[in-house]
Amino acid sequence: MPKLPPKDYITAVPFPTTITMEPIGVVHSPYTERHGTPRQSELRHKPEGYQPVLARIEIFKDKVPTVALKDIDGFDRIWILAWLHLNKHWNPMVKPPRGPKVKRGTLATRAPHRPNPIGLSAPKLHRVEDNILFVEGIDLLDQTPILDIKPYVTYCDAFPEAKSGYVDELNTNKSRERDIFGAESIPKSK
């Protein structure tokens, strides 16, 4: 059999100038305002008495059939990609909430105000019921649109020895968040 010439996949399709996405789900969280909402799904230095909240991620059945969630309940954590729809503007430099009030490049932070306001969160997955994922440690506001869900896979998602730039110094100094987060129960279905 003759060898076929290689295909040039890179130039086969033009580079996109716009990208269109539709939410596949929504967050049902006890958090309704930005102030007081955790900035990460897991805190390194937890305030005394801290209890991460429980929340629900509803997957829209008309966009994604329930069978697409098959086998996800075997994972301890999931990645949530969300559209931070309340953020309409961004700046190239921001002051992170932890540590000295020094401006950092936005792309070197987890600031929600970004060129494309895509959020990334890795809460604990408690259980799945039909099209609902019950999670612990949510850092997203109620009604946040969900773009995608992926399993958290330790061997390729965790690099404990990786350097974390200025954040390593903050961790060494035990710099903490000032917000206090309370325990909440899972919001009831609507």
Image: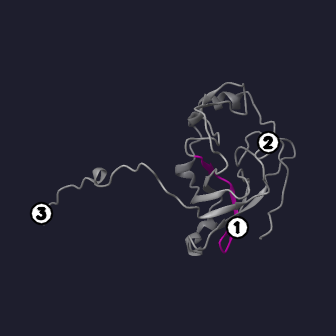
How many circles with numbers are drawn on the protein? 3
Are the residues tagged 2 and 3 within 8 Å (C-beta)?
A: no
Q: Is residue 87 magenta?
A: no
Image coords of residue 181 (percent x, y): 83, 47
Depicted 171 relative to depicted 126: above or below: above
Residue occupying image coordinates x 61% and y 38%: 90
Q: Which mark is residue 46?
A: 2
Which residue is situated farthest in the front direction here? 88
Which residue is situated farthest in the right direction here? 49
Q: Amino acid at mark 3?
A: Pro
Residue under pointer 1: 127
Residue under pointer 3: 2
Give the extent of the magenta segment: 117-133
Give SS at disc 3. loop
Give SS at disc 2. loop
Q: Amino acid at mark 2?
A: Lys
Image coords of residue 105 (percent x, y): 58, 30
Pointer 2 or 3: first along the chain: 3
Q: CA distance from mark 1 to mark 2?
A: 24 Å
